[in-house]
Image (cartoon, grey):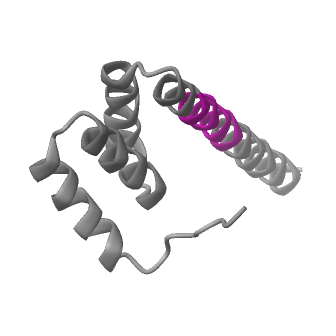
């Protein structure tokens, strides 16, 4: 009986962890979409703030790339160059060609 209770507790913990991870992924996806929309609308300062916040939470090369692009569009070339270089040496950056 104790073993069953332990197994149920472990299963519940795993399920809640997966749910939290999924919620976090969804929140990050929403933030990324918002950042991209801000870039498209020309609201570069807002996009920069969104991507900076995301980069603190994820360290994602794709987010770093979009932050670099946003900085470049604002004329912040030195910081953009640094980030572009960091992305260029990352091995797990996916490129989508449309």
Picture quarter with the C terminus = bottom right
Extent of the magenta region = 21-33
Q: Is residue 88 above or below residue 64?
A: below
**Circle count:** 0
Give the residue displayed 43% in from the left and 81% down from the top.
Answer: 91
In magenta segment, residue 30: yes
Please indicate whether residue 13 sits to the left or right of residue 63 in the image: right
Residue 54: give x, y in percent of width and height: 41, 37
Please indicate whether residue 87 sits to the left or right of residue 15 in the image: left
Q: Is residue 92 above or below residue 66?
A: below
Residue 33: give x, y in percent of width and height: 61, 32
Residue 87: give x, y in percent of width and height: 34, 67
Q: Is residue 15 above or below residue 61?
A: above
Give the residue displayed 34% in from the left and 39% down from the top.
Answer: 70
In magenta segment, residue 32: yes
Give the residue displayed 54% in from the left and 33% down from the top.
Answer: 36
Question: Magenta residues: mostly which secondary structure?
Answer: helix
Give the residue displayed 18% in from the left and 59% down from the top.
Answer: 81
Residue 57: give x, y in percent of width and height: 39, 41
Would you say residue 83 is visible in this rendering?
yes
Q: Nearer the viewer, residue 7 or 55?
A: 55
Would you say residue 59 is visible in this rendering?
no
């Amino acid at each position: 009986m104790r073993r069953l209770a332990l197994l149920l507790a472990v299963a519940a913990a795993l399920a809640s962890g997966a749910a939290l991870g999924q919620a976090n992924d969804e929140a990050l996806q929403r933030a990324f979409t918002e950042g991209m929309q801000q870039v498209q609308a020309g609201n570069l300062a807002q996009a920069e703030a969104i991507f900076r916040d995301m980069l603190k939470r994820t360290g994602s090369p794709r987010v770093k790339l979009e932050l670099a692009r946003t900085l470049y569009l604002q004329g912040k070339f030195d910081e953009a160059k640094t980030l572009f270089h960091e992305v260029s040496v990352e091995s797990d950056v996916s490129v989508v060609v449309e």
